Image (cartoon, helix red, strand yellow):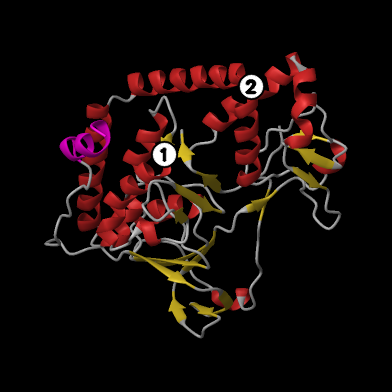
């Protein structure tokens, strides 16, 4: 197992000593970055009664609505990309965003196939969308150049008055792990092509055309089954080893053990195409995941909880004075009837 959330990335902008600021009610916050931790911190800022949250980022990634996360986690067979995009669109439509046109989505002409690729995982939330809808949260594409007293100055000259700056810039891996495992190259996710030396390291970001979950656990399950399979049958691995994607060590990079989502996707496609018994075993794991998920979170219960939370956050925004007391109460975009018509009946 290799850790990837090891060393937080930090940028020391000029003007840090002059910035000042304090966190509290009615604060204006700038969050730098647009990954999963940013999405979580938007929620925290709203709950702590912040007046305004600006998300400053180079790339606006997709966030995962809670109902879409529920859908893919409850699927016994991974859900094709087009269904996931349509499910995203039900929420993103509130913000006037066309998900099909988003840079993350690469679809064919008739939208029968779609691959979603981004450098961060989907932060799962609904409050982020509410905050954006009511303009409590605003996403700005740009980069920070420096700080000044009570200000963030962007490279395009725009200045943002704020009380707090939060850095959600991701992380790097353990800089000594390549040496610990004697890394020279990967074939698949096996170090130096050795079937007895696999590495399970969460691939950074997303690249997939079918989805069985937004969390890390479903991917771990499939990799662990595959690793055990080749520990039991190393000769089978040797037969396909040279077909697997290969990456060699870059001496200028200290974390070669962290592979990309595309690397995992290509490896999995090749192995499942060559070993039907392995594919069947992984399919059984997907069924077990789906059964447990649906038993713990049946549709009616989960949808009701999402709706109740949605209404609770609208009330909270009004009670805290973050939006006017007479502001329109936007409807939750997912309902049992609509969900059933679009996803249960094909």
In the displayed image of the protein, which residue is found farthest to the top? 232
- 12 above or below 325? below
Residue 227: image x %, image y %? 69, 23
Asked if residue 342 lies in the magenta stretch, the reply is: yes
Q: Nearer the viewer, residue 4 or 315?
A: 4
Q: Residue at x 16, y 36 (%)?
A: 337
> Where is residue 136, by image quadrant?
bottom left
Residue 202 in sight here: no
Which residue has dot 2 on it? 275
Label 2 Cα crowd, 10 Å radius (few <14 / some 14-19 / many 20+): few
Disc sitting over residue 80 in the figure: 1
* The C terminus: image quadrant: top left
Residue 28 in sight here: yes
- Mark 1 secondary-structure assignment: strand
Residue 265 placement, left or right of 150: right
Q: Which residues are magenta?
A: 335-346
> Where is residue 185, by image quadrant?
top right
Residue 336: image x %, image y %? 19, 35
> Where is residue 124, by image quadrant?
top left
- 336 above or below 138? above
Residue 240: image x %, image y %? 75, 29
Residue 151: image x %, image y %? 49, 78
Q: Residue at x 23, y 43 (%)?
A: 334
> What secondary structure is the stretch in magenta mostly built from?
helix
């Amino acid at each position: 197992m290799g850790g990837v959330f090891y060393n937080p990335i930090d940028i020391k902008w000029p003007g840090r000593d002059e910035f000042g600021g304090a966190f509290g009610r009615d604060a204006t916050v700038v969050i730098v970055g647009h990954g999963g931790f940013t999405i979580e911190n938007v929620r925290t800022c709203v709950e702590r009664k912040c007046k305004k949250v600006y998300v400053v980022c180079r790339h606006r990634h997709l966030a995962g609505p809670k109902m879409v996360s529920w859908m893919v986690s409850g699927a016994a067979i991974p859900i094709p990309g087009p269904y996931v995009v349509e499910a995203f669109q039900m929420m993103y439509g509130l913000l006037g965003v066309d998900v099909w046109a988003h840079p993350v989505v690469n679809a064919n002409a008739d939208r029968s196939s779609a691959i979603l690729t981004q450098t961060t995982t989907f932060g799962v939330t609904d409050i982020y969308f509410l905050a954006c809808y009511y303009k409590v949260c605003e996403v700005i594409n740009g980069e920070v150049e420096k700080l000044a007293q009570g200000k963030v100055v962007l490279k395009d000259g725009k200045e943002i008055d704020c009380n707090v700056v939060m850095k959600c810039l991701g992380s790097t891996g353990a800089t000594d792990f390549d040496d610990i495992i004697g890394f020279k190259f990967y074939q698949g996710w096996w170090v130096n092509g050795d079937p007895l030396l696999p590495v399970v390291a969460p691939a950074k970001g997303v690249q997939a055309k079918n989805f069985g979950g937004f969390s890390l656990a479903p991917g771990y399950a499939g990799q662990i089954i595959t690793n055990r399979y080749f520990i039991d049958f190393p000769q089978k691995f040797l037969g396909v080893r040279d077909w697997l994607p290969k990456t060699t060590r870059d001496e200028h990079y200290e974390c070669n053990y962290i592979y990309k989502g595309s690397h995992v996707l290509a490896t999995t496609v090749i192995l499942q195409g060559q070993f039907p018994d392995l594919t069947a075993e992984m399919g059984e794991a997907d069924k077990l995941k789906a059964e447990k998920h649906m038993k713990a979170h049946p549709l009616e219960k989960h949808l009701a909880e999402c709706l109740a939370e949605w209404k609770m956050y609208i009330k909270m925004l009004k009670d805290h004075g973050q939006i006017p007391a007479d502001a329109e109460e936007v409807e939750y975009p997912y309902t049992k009837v609509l969900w059933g018509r679009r996803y249960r009946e094909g």
